[in-house]
Image (tube, rainbow, N blue to C red):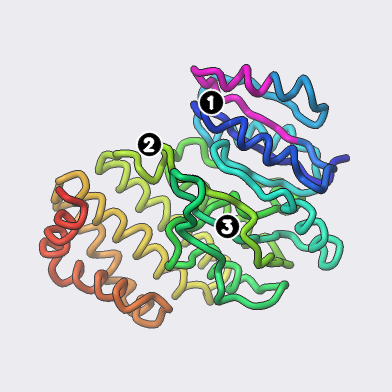
Amino acid sequence: MPEFSIIVPVYKVEKYLSRCIKSILSQEFGNFELILVDDGSPDSCGKICDEFAKNDARISVIHKDNGGVSSARNCGLKQACGRYICFVDSDDIIARNTLQLVQESINQFNPDMVIFDYSVIDSNATDIIDSKIDNIEGTVVDKKQAFDLCADFNRTVRMGIWNKIYRKECIATIAFDEKKVMAEDIEFLMKSLVRSDVITYIHAGLYGYYIQREDSAMFAKHSLNWYRSQFENVKESMQILTDADTSFSTAASAYACVNGGLSCANGMAICNSFDMETVKAIKEYLKKHLKDVRKSNLSFSKKAQIVLFVIAPHIYYTLMKRKFGR
């Protein structure tokens, strides 16, 4: 039985797929299986997957009709045989020593979840936009520290499922919600966090998150409904955490206010749509959680933005339109 099952959902990434697969196959620790899930990709991704599989018995390829990233990940989970599960996006990479360092952590602490650091890399593949997190010390972390690692508000990209390793037994009853097309990974992560008793942190940038793709999630143009749905999904995910442990209330509410509420407010500016129904929904949520926002470790700037939207949403909207060049 392999120690790790690495699941890679594949769709329209023919330019980057080989780089991703090669980074996985070059691991110093070799006891893993690589599950490539071709989610009905219309380009040459399926052929690329098959070619790699011909030359390495650790690779299995699933070809399926397009159903979205959640569907692809669920297919991979059903086939996974490893003791631990790892998700890698098909346009990203992992460092050669990733599994080796994770295995050392497993041997020493027998964790349910392992979190490792990541770097956000620009289109030149050399300039590091984000570096390691420096505000967490130690190897074994509690759930609050783990949440802080996931929700670090100073990072460009937050709350990913991809810079973590999950004990398969802990996530056996968890699946990605295939009806959700945004923030679905946050829900999975929160459910996994709730079920994890021992969590370790590796203070090394092992995951490389690339943002050079014009069609990547960070740069995609979305409708206002997309932002509204994201807002609702983030709120629901944070509620999962607070329902399990009320001590997370402050941190979870603050996260939802920023990455749900303010993100949706920014979405209105990006979409040039000052929608009163959306304004009301955001304002009510932010106002309800102002006490948590004040108590949280959010920066003064973020707190000020939240208060501004509650007091004068139209002014906030105007400022964001200028920021986004609308």
Give amino acid for label 1: Glu
What residue is rendered at 37% in x and 48% in y? 230
Locate residue 232, reporting x and y percent.
Answer: 37, 52
Q: Which residue is mark 3?
A: 118
Residue 14: numbered disc: 1
Mark 1 or 3 closer to N-term? 1
Give amino acid for label 3: Tyr
Locate residue 108, reporting x and y percent.
Answer: 85, 67
Secondary-structure class at tag 1: loop
Query: What segment carries the magenta color?
Result: 34-50
Q: CA distance from mark 1 to mark 3?
A: 23 Å
Q: Answer whether labels 1 and 2 touch (C-beta < 8 Å).
A: no
| Front-most of residues 179 and 325 | 325
Label 2 environment density (alpha carbons within 10 Å; few <14, some 14–19, many ≥20): few
What residue is rendered at 35% in x and 65% in y? 257
Residue 214: numbered disc: 2
In the picture shown, does residue 150 fall above or below 19? below
Secondary-structure class at tag 3: strand
The N terminus - image quarter: top right
Q: Answer whether labels 3 and 2 touch (C-beta < 8 Å).
A: no
Magenta region includes residue 5: no
Mark 3 or 2 closer to N-term? 3
Q: CA distance from mark 1 to mark 2?
A: 14 Å
| Front-most of residues 40 and 43 | 43
